[in-house]
Structure formats: C-alpha cells, structure tokens
Amino acid sequence: MLPIAMTAGYACGALIALAARRPLTRAYDPMRTRYCAVAAMFGVAAIGPSAALFYALYPDWSLMYFANPAHLSSAVMIPLLYLFAATSPVIGFLTTFRLSQLKKPRALRLSFAMVWLALFAFFAIGGERLGAVAYYDAFHAGGERVSLARSPLLFAVLVAALAIIAWIVFALIVVRRHVDLSEHLPGDGKEAKGSRFSLTSATAQSIAAAPSDANLPR
C-alpha cells in the first residue's frame, strides 16, 4: 500500500505542476508559489493521513507483507510513513517542474510513463498481497487469509480512494482556473524572472501617472 500511495502522490504533484506549467516558467521560485502549496496541502491532508491510518489499522497489509510490523515500532513507523507519503506530491511537483524546463520534452514524457508503469507493476505483481488480509506470519506460512472483498478494509480503501480522487480533481480545477485568470490580468500576468517584487505594466503606469512632490501645490 505504501509504494502505491507514494507513487500516486508523486503523480498528483506532477499533474499539478503540469497544469500550472506556463505561470511556473515565470515564477521566481516554484517552491514559493501557490501551486506548490496546493501540492503540499494534498500530501499533508490526503496522502499522508491515508498512509498513516492504514498502517495504524492494518499494518501487515499496509506493508504488503514485505516486513513484519511486530518487529517495528509504531511510534517510529507511523510518523515515518506519514512523512514519506506526505512529501511525495511535492517531490513530483518539483521534479516535473525541472523536467518541463528542458528543451526536449522526452524526459518529461518518460517520467510520466515510468509513473504509470510503476502503478501497473504494483497492482499486477502485488495483486495477491493487496487482495488478501492476514497477519504477516499467516500470509507467508500459508495460514488463514481473508479476501479483501470480504473484509471491512475494502470499505476503507474505497472511501480513501474516492476522497483522494475527488481532492485531486478539485485541486486541478482550481489550479487551471487560477492559471486562466492570471493570464488575463493586466500585463498578461508576466513577471520578471529576476525579481520577486516585479510590477505589472498596469501598476507601473499608475505609478508613473501619480503626481510627484515637485508638481504638488505649495
């Protein structure tokens, strides 16, 4: 579950960066834009809590039976999994931003292809692990397993998946609307790359038209 959550978070952050590609090229620092803040909020409020909650409730299944939770400290694992999952959208956002700055789009396309290939591999290869709910020892020793379809875990998975999908769709809609509005602002939303406090043409004209101290009546 954790590899899937991190890959999905990376993909969502990458989609946010792709949706805001044009204004990001004019940004002084992409880390300080509201688009990066959206990606960070998505990780903090959606991906991170989901990963931590699934580990707290179903630790064996959450680790896909690759490690025995009985030998791991929950006080360490829960914050660690939250951190890994919560930062994945920001990593995807920044990686996509850097790749989009390259002259050739091949690297950007390849990164998205790798993400979808990784998700497909996780579901195809780990389908047996994801579809069974059991303890670590029982899973590897051929003990009792419960099908995911007959487990209460299925409801939690569906709710989390639908909530994450709704969140990212809403975020992408908001980002696209903001991008469209910013491109229709006075001065076409263009900012100088070398300054954080660059002025639009409309602001500069209004300042130039303002009366100076020399022209004021004495």
Image: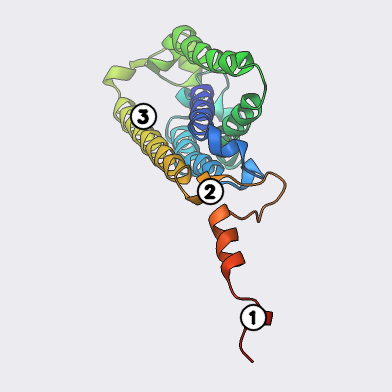
Q: CA distance from mark 3 to mark 1?
A: 65 Å
Q: Pick out the residue farthest to the right.
A: 194
In the image, is 127 to the left or to the right of 106?
Answer: left
Q: Residues within 10 Å of mark 3 (few under 14, many from 20)?
A: some
Q: Quadrant of residue 74?
A: top right
Q: Could you tell me residue 134's position as x and y percent? A: 41, 20
Q: CA distance from mark 3 to mark 2?
A: 41 Å
- Residue annotated with mark 2: 187
Say which amino acid is labelled 2: Gly
Say which amino acid is labelled 1: Asn
In the image, is 151 to the left or to the right of 47?
Answer: left
Camera-side residue of 121 and 132: 121
State the quadrant of the C terminus.
Answer: bottom right
Camera-side residue of 47 and 74: 47
- Residue annotated with mark 1: 215
In primary-sequence order, the first of circles 3 and 2 is 3
User: Which residue does the image show at 67% across and 52% down from the upper left?
Assistant: 196
Camera-side residue of 122 and 20: 20
Camera-side residue of 131 and 98: 98
User: Which residue does the image show at 62% across and 41% down from the upper left?
Assistant: 30
Dot 2: element: helix
Q: Residues within 10 Å of mark 1 (few under 14, many from 20)?
A: few
In primary-sequence order, the first of circles 3 and 1 is 3
Dot 1: element: helix
Q: Could you tell me residue 194's position as x and y percent? A: 72, 46
- Residue annotated with mark 3: 161
Question: Which circle, 3 or 2, is nearer the viewer?
Answer: 2
